[in-house]
Image: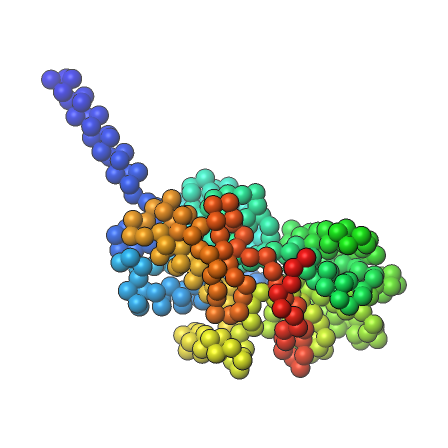
Amino acid sequence: MHCRLSMIAAATVMVVATSAAAQTRGVTKTEVTLGTHTDLSGVAATYGVSSSNAVKMRFDEINEAGGIHGRKLRFLIEDQGYQVPKAVQACNKLINRDKVFAFVGALGTPMNNACFKDQLAAEVPNLFPLTAARSMFEPFHRLKFYNAATYVDQLRSAVNYFVKEKGKKAVCVMYQDTDAGKEFLEGAELQAKKLGIKLVETTSHKPTDQDFTAPITKLRQAGCDLIVMGTIVRDSIVPYITARKTGWTDVDFVGSAAAYDSVVGAAQGMDGFHAMGLTEMPYPDSTVPAVRDFVERYKKKFNVDPNIGAVYGYVGADLTVAGLKNAGADLTLDSFVKGMEAIKGYKDIFNGPEVSFGPQIRQGANSSFLAVVKGGRWTRVTEPLGF
């Protein structure tokens, strides 16, 4: 009798274990729960709000059309205020309490980096974060997917173009003293080395710095004819205007996609400033019909114009949808990874680069184009550039 009870108990344990194994976190017969940690209240809130809005918008469109393989997409958004401790708290909640299937469009280099250990240990994929740091797909991890050129790639392309096509000889760098800033610097360093030239001068600053007179004076005295900007929004605008106001006009400034922002383009005095772009800017009068349609739908839903963050969020959500569709009706972590790896030659509606993944490929594209501010708006200068 005792033996029989033991066998029944063992069988029960096996059944429980099997059903637990069969249950994929965040997935039921009718729903997939996805989440993000982003900035809704801090220094990058314009990106965080717009990108998470656009993810929600794409998922709502899918749900209104019946979902994916009979499942609706549920999307949870946690505010981390662009602060690492808050990001860790938000990640822990999404992983442990909400049991999300994956993160989509999480914002910030240090915030994503801080979450990776617990997130990947829990086998929660990180999909299309709003940062172009290489750590978003390096070192290789099967659950990290990123779809565009990194800051390093972008600034390598910029330096290559200005030296080879525009004859620049005295390349300098102004960069934020942050994780992202060091990536900007490295991009310029790597390409300078490849081209057999040396960077003439570099300056760094804190993200909160207000006055750029001293670094601009230092760079001017060094004779720079190209300044590669490892900056974001305000710290792109102020140094450029400072230089132009002092009469320094025989120098070009070029930023990464972090500076390719409608606020930068619209700021007074920014005409002539260059940056590397990944997609069309979402202007309401865009020459691209699909972009105009997106702007109209976004504004109708959220009562505000989208910015470039909304574009990145929408594309990330659409790629996630493609992976979920490819995964088939039996959605597991493994089938989803295979579904993502099956994405080949994906084209978004914003004229972004073609995106392809594979069993060992986690960066979907690495080209970017050069754009310049003209008349208070961004204008594309080149086709996609490499290095």
- Asked whether residue 207 appears in the rendered view, the answer is no
**For residue 89, side relative to residue 135 (left or right):** left
Q: For this rendering, which residue is in front, 290 or 131?
A: 290
Measured from the top left, where is residue 169 in percent x and y? 83, 62
Measured from the top left, where is residue 277 in percent x and y? 61, 66
Q: Tell me what residue is drawn at x 62 percent, y 65 percent.
A: 384
**For residue 158, side relative to residue 213 (left or right):** left
Q: For this rendering, which residue is in front, 276 or 209?
A: 276
- Asked whether residue 186 appears in the rendered view, the answer is yes
Q: Residue furthest top?
A: 2
- In the picture, the quarter occupied by the N terminus is top left
Q: Quadrant of residue 165?
A: bottom right
- In the picture, the quarter occupied by the C terminus is bottom right
Q: For this rendering, which residue is in front, 48 or 349?
A: 349
Q: Tell me what residue is drawn at x 65 percent, y 70 percent.
A: 382
Q: Tell me what residue is drawn at x 52 percent, y 55 percent.
A: 364
Q: Residue furthest left?
A: 1
